[in-house]
Image (cartoon, grey):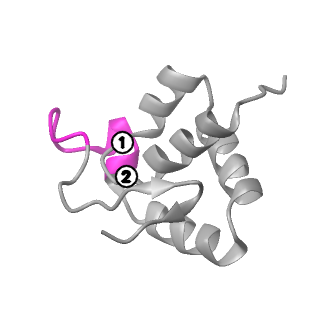
Amino acid sequence: MKIEFSDLDKDRIIEIAWEDRTTFEAIELQFGLKEEQVINLMRREMKSSSFKMWRKRVQTRKTKHEKLRNFTEGRFKCSRQRQINNNKISKR
């Protein structure tokens, strides 16, 4: 089953996938995409170098998986997190 998303939805999925404390389970709850589907969307929509950097970072984060977290609550987004618009990280 292939789910079609608008460009705005794709940008939002990419934005929240970059956030360290947003779990793959939260993305699945909001958009219906499992972890593998998020990875495929990121691979398809991002530059190769950006995707590789994201994958390297995500693979070392326990916070991306609800079951591996050692806390139950936390800020949804880091205050120092830069905004991502149109698949590009914008400067402040």
Labelled disc at residue 19: 2
Task: Tell whether position 64 is magenta.
Answer: yes
Q: Which residue is mark 1?
A: 22
Against 9, residue 17 (above or below) is below
Indicate the position of residue 90 as horizontal and vertical percent values.
43, 66
Q: Nearer the viewer, residue 6 or 29?
A: 6
Against 28, residue 54 (above or below) is below
The residue depicted at 78 percent of the width and 28 percent of the height is 4
Neighbour tally class for label 1: few under 14, some 14-19, many 20 plus, Cα within 10 Å: many
Task: Tell whether position 41 is magenta.
Answer: no
The rendered magenta stretch, by its main secondary structure, is classed as: loop
Q: Nearer the viewer, residue 85 or 14?
A: 85
**Callout 1 touching callout 2 (CB < 8 Å):** yes
Which residues make up the magenta segment? 63-76
The three-letter code of the residue at mark 1 reads Thr
The residue depicted at 70 percent of the width and 47 percent of the height is 41
Tell me which corner region of the image, top left, top right, bottom left or bottom right, holds residue 87: bottom right
Q: Quadrant of the C terminus?
A: bottom left
Instruction: Describe the element under mark 1 as helix, strand or loop.
Output: loop
Instruction: Describe the element under mark 2 as helix, strand or loop.
Output: loop
Indicate the position of residue 18 as horizontal and vertical percent values.
44, 55
Indicate the position of residue 34 as horizontal and vertical percent values.
61, 33
